[in-house]
Image: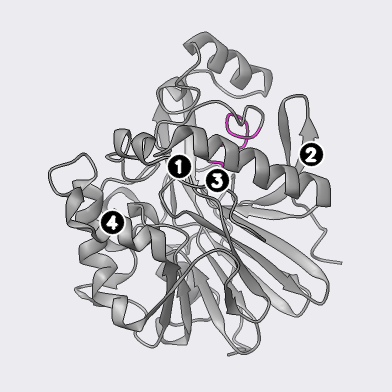
Amino acid sequence: MSSFLNMNRRGLFAAAGIGALAAPFVLRSTAFAQSNQPQTSMKVNHAMPPETNRFKLGNFEVLVVKDGARASGAPGETFGTNQSKDAVGDLLQKNFLPADQFVNSFSPALINTGSDLVLFDTGFGEGGREVGNGRLMEGLAAAGYTPDDVTVVVLTHMHGDHIGGLMEKGAPAFPKARYVMGQAEYDFWTDAKRVGTPAEGGQKGVLANVKPLAEKATFIGDGATVVPGITSMAAFGHSPGHMIFRVESEGKQLVLTADTANHFVLSLQRPEWEVKFDMDKAAAAASRKKVFDMIATDRLPFLGYHMPFPAVGYAEKQDVGYRFVPKSYQFDI
């Protein structure tokens, strides 16, 4: 598939300092334990593993891990920034949500293809644990996996809540893995031109967590094969090289949309509304429409990094946007 969009560089530089939406800075037969922690709980019970969800996709197995969640106030300061506060609040209330708060969760995914364990994004890592995030490792352990089992780590983009778990105590967190990342994304964040700009904070995270792994990385663009059955698609806008991925096995498909949409109501029902953390807002809105038009038209399930856990569902065309339909038992029968 051809690239969805080209990046508007002027728009990118104007918004480049925000970093991440909520971020500061091999087949196994092991038994699987799933947490009974309520999905609505904002309190972390460290005596229990984080929430996880495991399902089949053809011959593949997908494991979603809740790296954490965070409640925030003033939704209109993040979503619909080109709209009135009342318009944002009204849309939330129509969807049975509070007008003055929203919850953002973070969901890395591990796909077991039978020959590879492919991890998509790494959560906050050790830097987020003080506030209850950075629970990916716990989730993998609950599912019977160790960091050594991961053979491929894919970065959808390089905001802090996606790359924070790449390193652990100064060493690679997944020591036997190779890495796959977007060439455009890497080039932007490692460019010395970021120094002294609003993007410098994000660059520091990339230099600390991503650049040390570059020798083991494959740099890709649109239409690249990660492993058989997993293909990249360009969906620029949220970041300069933001990538999504189509997963296919035995005729079953799943699209990993990463941060194309960051709220299941505000980003999907109103895809044209601007989002504070989209670095090129016009390109991000165009990507949302193109990606979710495809998903809705082809009736494809998708996994969105910030969707309500377990972050998997469908998009139904509705009015000027899309209605999020969370998965239930479709993958279990």
Closest to the camera, between mark 2 and mark 3, is 3
The residue at which mark 3 appears reads as: 260
Disc 1 residue type (three-letter)? Met
Closest to the camera, between mark 2 and mark 1, is 2
Is residue 267 covered in magenta?
A: yes
Figure label count: 4
- Helix, strand or loop at label 3? It is loop
Q: Is residue 66 in sight in this rendering? A: yes
Residue 190, picture quadrant: bottom left
**Where residue 228 appears, x then y in whole percent?**
65, 82
Q: Is residue 13 above or below residue 258?
A: above
**Where residue 151 appears, x then y in whole percent?**
48, 84
Cβ–Cβ below 8 Å for labels 3 and 4?
A: no
- Helix, strand or loop at label 1? It is loop
Cβ–Cβ below 8 Å for labels 1 and 4?
A: no
Q: Main secondary structure of the magenta part?
A: loop
CA–CA distance in space, label 2 to label 1: 29 Å
- Taking the spot 51% from the left edge, 39% from the top edge, the residue there is 284
The residue at which mark 4 appears reads as: 189
- Taking the spot 39% from the left edge, 88% from the top edge, the residue there is 176
Residue 8, picture quadrant: top left
The residue at which mark 1 appears reads as: 42
Q: Residues within 10 Å of mark 4 (few under 14, many from 20)?
A: many
Q: Is residue 57 above or below residue 65?
A: below
The residue at which mark 2 appears reads as: 316
Magenta range is: 260-268
- Taking the spot 42% from the left edge, 57% from the top edge, the residue there is 157
- Helix, strand or loop at label 4? It is helix
